[in-house]
Image (cartoon, rainbow, N blue to C red):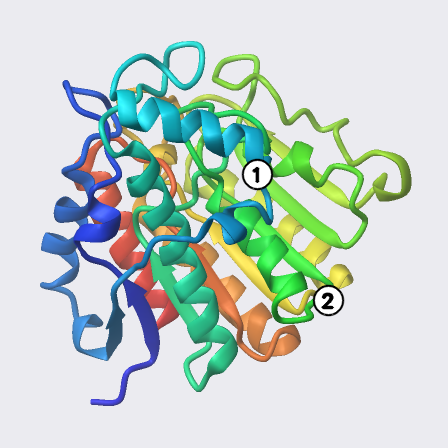
Amino acid sequence: MQPTAILVCGEQIASYGFPGGHPFGPDRHAAFMHELERSQCWERLARRAARPATREELELFHTPEYLERVDRASRAGEGFLDAGDTPAFPGVYEAAANVVGGTLEALAGIMAGPLRRAFVPIAGLHHAGRDHAAGFCVFNDCGVAIEAARRRYGLQRVAYVDIDAHHGDGVFYAFEDDPLLAFADLHEDGRFLYPGTGDRSETGRGAAVGTKLNIPMPPGAGDEQFRRAFEEVERYLEAQRPELILLQCGADSLAGDPITHLAYTEAAHAYAAARLRDLAERHCGGRLLAMGGGGYNRRNLARAWTRVLEAMS
């Protein structure tokens, strides 16, 4: 059977997870793979391993000073990289670099063809800023991928779509004044959930005013509300005419997640992936890269991400 999508998986990215009962534990990859291997799309996937991103690649988005700080904390293997959500552990630098490398491998595969869709489960670390860690995120693979798409592959109009329950603040503020980065984010209202950002009024800054779309969702919002909101995302993206679409499909927006309050089912994620697949065919030569993001109920993330891959493949 001919493969129809790329899956980046394996121990390199599975190692990104925090010990000691942390919500973002190292068991998330295995939970997903157990579900995926029983799905109808398993045989249609071209599986690839991740690799560590180089320092030069990480510096496409992050400052050298921040990379040095993470490296020191990684060797020390203790303390926190932020105010208390993101602990250091021995080898955290290497584990986080593998996540970025996995996303870059997926991007390279898409750009080389013939396959034009890819998924990386342990990825989409959208809270990390250019010079800081935040919210379980050490390196921002989304931000690195956006910069790589432009500098390495010559793309200009990149679209970033985020359906994680948490606002993708690390991406938004890094590109807030960039008119060519189309940003659309459906997230739980920041009045109720970390990081407290992503208000409707945040539409970009300077030359980029009006090029960013933030849609806060009320706690308890379900699939019907999601679909109505996603229609607005689609209209926005049609107008932007992107050359590449990135999808951060965090599963913490499903009902039953232990740290959020939305109530989608996995059908919402399948719907978003299918709609973006079709939009990518119209505007991007099919180029669609999805990243797992958050999700702390293991059954939820396994089912949501499997549905995403089924829609993509």
Residue 62, label in figure? 1
Residue that appears at 59% across and 44% down: 61
Looking at the image, residue 44 sits to the left or right of residue 223; the answer is: left
Looking at the image, residue 41 sits to the left or right of residue 59; the answer is: left
In the rendered image, residue 190, in percent from the top left (x then y), is placed at 56, 19
**Residue type, mark 1 in image:** His
Residue that appears at 60% across and 35% down: 63
- Of labels 2 and 1, earlier in sequence is 1
Looking at the image, residue 196 sits to the left or right of residue 76; the answer is: right
Residue that appears at 19% across and 46% down: 29
Pointer 2: what residue? 241
Please name which of the two marks, 2 or 1, marks the residue nearer to the observer.
1
Work out whether residue 262 or residue 6 is closer to the camera in this orientation and state it: 6
Q: Residue furthest bottom?
A: 1
Looking at the image, residue 312 sits to the left or right of residue 304; the answer is: right
Q: Can you see residue 41?
A: yes
Residue 117, placed above or below residue 305: below
In the rendered image, residue 65, in percent from the top left (x then y), is placed at 56, 29
In the rendered image, residue 222, in percent from the top left (x then y), is placed at 42, 35
Q: CA distance from mark 2 to mark 1?
A: 27 Å
